[in-house]
Image: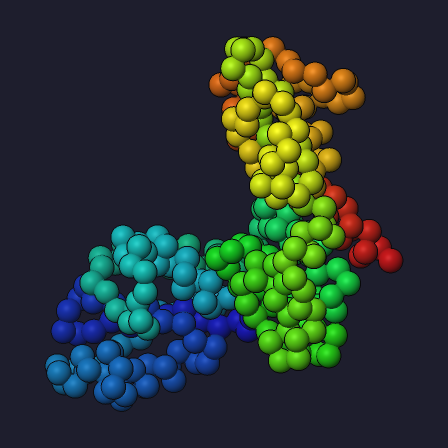
């Protein structure tokens, strides 16, 4: 980001009317443009009143766009979603000074914060589904079903689409590279289901069931006998899910995986926390991989 200026213009027609602007050129050049371009809002005021804007003061700033954002963040007008390039407002001078003081101290816009654990987990999931398909994920996946991500096939074609579509088997839209049947992908990544089980004749006890495949495939054989599914969740890392749910229930593995005496509400809370716990563990592993790759 090139350093520049934040400047304040005043207009003779209204002592409380201020134009706040930023530029990487001399503020005097922008003043001339504001007074001569009648298509801009500032120029319209000049045309209507016959009076020109005057340069009241300007200050050097390291990051003009960030300084401007910080300025408006100190005002009651900061919640306006989009100013559409119109930085003209009626304010008292004390408010303008407060904004300028903040803008002068703003420095350079801070970099992005650390990625949430779920982003690492989503990214790891899609990369796992792309293995052996000749498709590379470019960057991170911030949302699997509602956002967009960038991909590149082995033939060099790049495209942007919803990650879940590619994860479920969609190939390159230009050459078809990487197209797979969803069932093939599910079997290869060993996706499965983890369940919180209850028993009609054993109140106060819960158990954990898990299996590889779809709900229908697993439940068809009634693998847990008279134990009933109270909660269930699709998971791609079945072993990790099992390890974490027992830990959340206060009974970390290894043990014989027999039913345990546990209040159902406590077990339900543990099951709700499972997704977040999995995201955290997967994120730790992915961060370690990133750190290792940077050291190579």
Q: Compare residues 179 and 281 and report the one nearer the observer.
A: 179
What is the quadrant of the C terminus in the image?
bottom right
Q: Residue at x 53, y 71 (%)?
A: 3
Q: Residue at x 51, y 66 (%)?
A: 63
Q: Position of residue 156 (x, y in %)?
A: 71, 79
Query: Taking the image as drawn, is residue 31 in sight?
Result: yes
Instruction: Say which residue appears at 65% left-offset and 62% top-offset.
Output: 181
Q: How is the image coloured?
A: rainbow
Residue 108 makes an appearance in the image: no
Residue at the image position 62 percent from the left and 29 percent from the top:
222
Q: How many marks?
A: 0
| Residue 19 x %, y % | 28, 70
In this rendering, the answer to whether 119 lies above or below 108 is above
Q: Is residue 77 above or below residue 174?
A: above
Q: Position of residue 294 (x, y in %)?
A: 80, 57
Quarter of the image for residue 215 reads: top right
Q: Percent position (x, y) of residue 182?
A: 63, 58
**Front residue of this view, candidates 90 and 183:** 183
Residue 102 position (above or below residue 274): below
Q: Residue furthest front?
A: 221
In the figure, is residue 51 to the left or right of 172?
Answer: left
Q: Quadrant of residue 254?
A: top right
- Could you tell whether 26 is left or right of 182 in the image? left
User: For residue 270, which quarter of the picture?
Assistant: top right
Q: Quadrant of the N terminus?
A: bottom right
């Amino acid at each position: 980001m090139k350093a520049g200026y934040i400047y304040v213009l005043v207009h003779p027609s209204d002592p409380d009317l201020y134009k706040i602007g930023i530029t990487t050129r001399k503020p005097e050049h922008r003043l001339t443009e504001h007074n001569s371009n009648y298509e801009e809002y500032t120029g319209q005021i000049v045309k209507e009143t016959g009076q020109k804007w005057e340069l009241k003061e300007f200050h050097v700033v390291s990051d003009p766009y960030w300084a401007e954002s910080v300025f408006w963040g100190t005002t009651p007008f900061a919640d306006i979603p989009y100013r559409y390039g119109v930085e003209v407002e009626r304010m008292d001078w004390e408010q303008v000074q407060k904004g300028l003081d903040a803008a002068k101290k703003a420095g350079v816009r801070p970099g992005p914060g650390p990625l949430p654990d779920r982003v690492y987990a989503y990214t790891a999931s899609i990369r796992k589904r792309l293995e052996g398909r000749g498709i590379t994920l470019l960057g991170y996946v911030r949302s699997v079903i509602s956002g967009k991500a960038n991909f590149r096939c082995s033939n060099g074609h790049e495209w942007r689409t919803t990650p879940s579509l590619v994860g479920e088997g969609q190939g390159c839209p230009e050459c078809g590279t990487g197209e797979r049947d969803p069932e093939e992908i599910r079997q290869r990544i060993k996706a499965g289901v983890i369940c919180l089980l209850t028993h009609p004749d054993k109140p106060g006890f819960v158990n954990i069931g898990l299996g590889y495949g779809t709900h229908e495939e697993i439940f068809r054989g009634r693998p847990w006998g008279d134990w009933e599914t109270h909660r269930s969740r699709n998971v791609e890392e079945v072993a990790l899910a099992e390890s974490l749910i027992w830990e959340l229930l206060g009974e970390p593995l290894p043990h014989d995986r027999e039913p345990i005496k546990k209040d159902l509400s406590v077990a339900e809370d543990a099951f709700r926390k499972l997704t977040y716990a999995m995201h955290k563990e997967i994120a730790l592993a992915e961060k370690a991989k990133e750190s290792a790759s940077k050291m190579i």
